Image: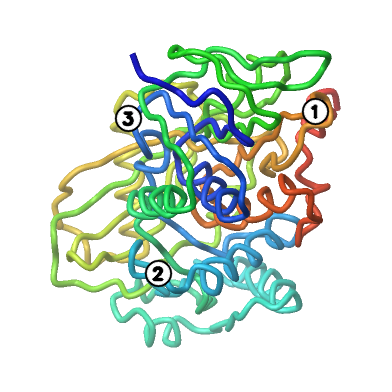
Amino acid sequence: MRTIPPRADVVIIGAGVVGAATAYFAAASGLDVVVVERGTIAAGTSSRCEGNILVSDKEVGPELELSLYSQRVWREDLAEFAGLWEFEAKGGVVVASGSAGLAGLRTLAQHQAGLGIRVEVIDSIAGVAELEPSINRDLAGGAYYPDDAQVQPLLATHHLLRLARGHGATVLTGTEVTGILVERDQVTGVETAAGRMSAPAVVNCAGAWSGEIAALANVHLPVLPRRGFVLVTEPVPITVHHKVYAAEYVGDVASSDAGLQVSPVVEGTPSGTILMGASRERVGFDASFSAEAVARIAASGLQLFPVLRGVRAQRAYSGFRPYCPDHLPSIGADARLPGLWHAAGHEGAGVGLSVGTGKLLAQGLTGRTPDLDLTPFRPERLAEVAAA
């Protein structure tokens, strides 16, 4: 039977990238941290995604502010570790199929530029082709975001936890949390299959399963799984230099439609394979293969890069993006139950937002004022959204 520590300052539930980032910053702040994971490290969404660190797909609002903050954390606070998780500042290119889409993209870019995002609107497909020579020449134009980046999410998760251990954190895998201990309306620790552990703070970083963890404390947190597929081609000599996606992708991310949505996202990898996405659909935790989703992903990818026609698919994989009804993650202390904290509901932006989320939570957990106002992300707001 696994032995667990009798107490900790903070128990973090979930060893995905958000939990790993929170563990690192909390431990580096001097807190005694224990991470509890029922499976293995990065076994959930963090091993089934592309590792995006994007600003280009964020509409003006709190998530964009969190994205900009997280960019600074990746590039400044964690700069010395960038090679560990293959940080790649590849940049992003968003393309529009027609004049109306290009006009909408230009408006979004103007708003984003006013907030400090570096973006260049490209009014012709010829200009886009200077960045991506293999792009479909029937498109109208696009926008270039030089600060879009990517990491290898498995490496990021494992190394952040390794760094957290270097600051004294303990990571327990194969250990399921079966209950959250509460006394006098205050969280006092967790119950696990290996025994109890006392802690004045418990942070729910369980990704798409965060609603189930909150329910252990009789707290309602409407985080829902949104299934998405990624298609991987065989290695090819054709090069896609940036993350390239259609302007419609931004709208699909912000949609609450439960049905299957597919908007093209295409990028190359150092190994020569091409990644194609992205699909979204709410089907619960149904992990079965969807031929329809993958076929539509392939077809939409060819709309951006017809030159890939005839390239063979090597594999496809799927994951569950943790989705909140108002499309904002739940971050911070839960006012309904002192001692319960959440970092959940980042949907497809979890990797990019993870380190900003972790640093802000560590500031709150140590009694400091977070660098970014977390009011828009307060967990209890979701009860208000559900009632609206």
Task: Report the amino acid beneath label 3.
Answer: Ser
Q: Is residue 232 left or right of residue 3?
A: left
Which of the two residues, 32 or 228, is positioned nearer the viewer here?
32
Q: For residue 217, which quarter of the picture? A: top right
Label disc, if present, on residue 290 of the rendered structure: 3
* Element assignment for label 1: loop
Image depth: mark 3 or mark 2 in front? 2
Q: In this view of the protein, can residue 273 be seen by the observer?
A: yes
Q: Residue furthest front?
A: 6
* Element assignment for label 2: helix
Task: Report the amino acid beneath label 1.
Answer: Pro
- Report how far apart the C-alphas of labels 3 and 2 lie in the structure: 35 Å
Image quadrant for the C terminus?
A: top right
Label disc, if present, on residue 207 of the rendered structure: none
Residue under the point 64% across and 47% down: 254
Q: For residue 216, which quarter of the picture? A: top right
- Report how far apart the C-alphas of labels 1 and 2 lie in the structure: 36 Å
First in sequence, mark 3 or 2: give its number. Answer: 2
Image depth: mark 1 or mark 3 in front? 1
First in sequence, mark 1 or 2: give its number. Answer: 2
When the figure is inspected, residue 204 is found, relative to residue 133, above or below; the finding is: above
Residue under the point 45% across and 19% down: 176
Label 3: how many Cα within 10 Å (few below 14, some 14–19, many 20+): few
Label disc, if present, on residue 82 of the rendered structure: 2
The residue where tag 1 is placed is: 338
First in sequence, mark 1 or 3: give its number. Answer: 3
Which of the two residues, 102 or 348, is positioned nearer the viewer here?
348
Q: How many marks?
A: 3
- Report how far apart the C-alphas of labels 1 and 3 lie in the structure: 42 Å
